[in-house]
Image (cartoon, rainbow, N blue to C red):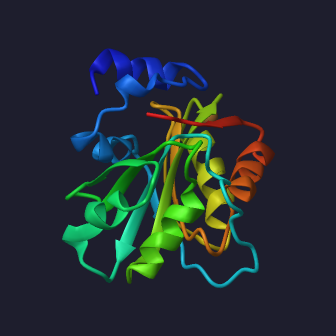
Amino acid sequence: MTTSLKLLVASAALVVLPASLQAAGDAACSTAKACCATTTATSTTSKESGTCCASAKGNYVMLKLKGGDAGAISQTLSKLDGVSAADTCSESKFTKISFNQEKVCSSKIMAALKDAGYKVQAQRVTYAVEGMSCGACTTKVTKALSKLKGVSETHVCSESKQAVIDFNPSKISVDKILATLDATGFKASEVVN
Ligand SMILES: [Cu+2]
């Protein structure tokens, strides 16, 4: 992703980029760099679970997978109609799975991976959080997110005005995370990059 494109994404609340700009390869690593504060929360069980297409806003899903053959993720997903690419970031270990949301949804992708022996350790979403301007703002947002069961890690940055959230999709839904962000008083919207 170019610097100007990055700035565009950071400054606008929600920029839906054309599909042509959603490059594969190192793009899978991009959201990991959008952070300056990190916390790791210990999570316990919760009854909540994501519904089908709960995170269908973006046409990709970022998953950290465990078990199965790590080198065969894209091969496994190529059998699924609607999946266009799967790239794993060697740094973050997250796999960015791009898909056509008219043909498939994140829940179906996760089910197919489960069938192939993979376990979804975490899902990563990035939100643009409007109005965060200093460390106190990021602390407020980080604190609110760390109280959520199922959220394992958050990276909140006042400079990029983004919150990168790692969570267990079988324990918490994106709607719940979004509601928590809204409750902090900042306006959050999913970043599609
Ligand atoms: Cu502030």
Q: Going by the image, does 183 lie left or right of 139?
A: right
Q: In which quarter of the image is the N terminus?
A: top left
Which residue is pictured at 38% across the width and 43% down the height? 31
Q: Is residue 33 above or below residue 109?
A: above
Decide which of 161, 18 is in the foreground and name it: 18
Q: Position of residue 100 (x, y in %)?
A: 50, 42
Which residue is pictured at 62% across the width and 74% down the height? 170
**Can residue 75 be seen?**
yes
Decide which of 100, 128 is in the foreground and name it: 100
Q: In which quarter of the image is the C terminus?
A: top left
Decide which of 150, 66 is in the foreground and name it: 66
**Can residue 93 be seen?**
no
Residue 76 picture quarter: bottom left
Q: Going by the image, does 96 lie left or right of 52?
A: left
Q: Where is residue 142 in the image (x, y as percent from the top left)?
A: 59, 54
Tally of numbered discs: 0
Q: Where is residue 48 in the image (x, y as percent from the top left)?
A: 75, 73
Q: In this view, does 178 lie above or below 95?
A: above
Decide which of 10, 47 is in the foreground and name it: 47
Q: In this view, does 134 lie above or below 150?
A: above
Which residue is pictured at 55% across the width and 23% down the height? 15
Q: Is residue 168 above or below residue 97?
A: below
Q: Where is residue 143 in the image (x, y as percent from the top left)?
A: 64, 58
Ligand 1 is found in the corner quadrant, namely top right
Which residue is pictured at 53% across the width and 32% down the height? 161
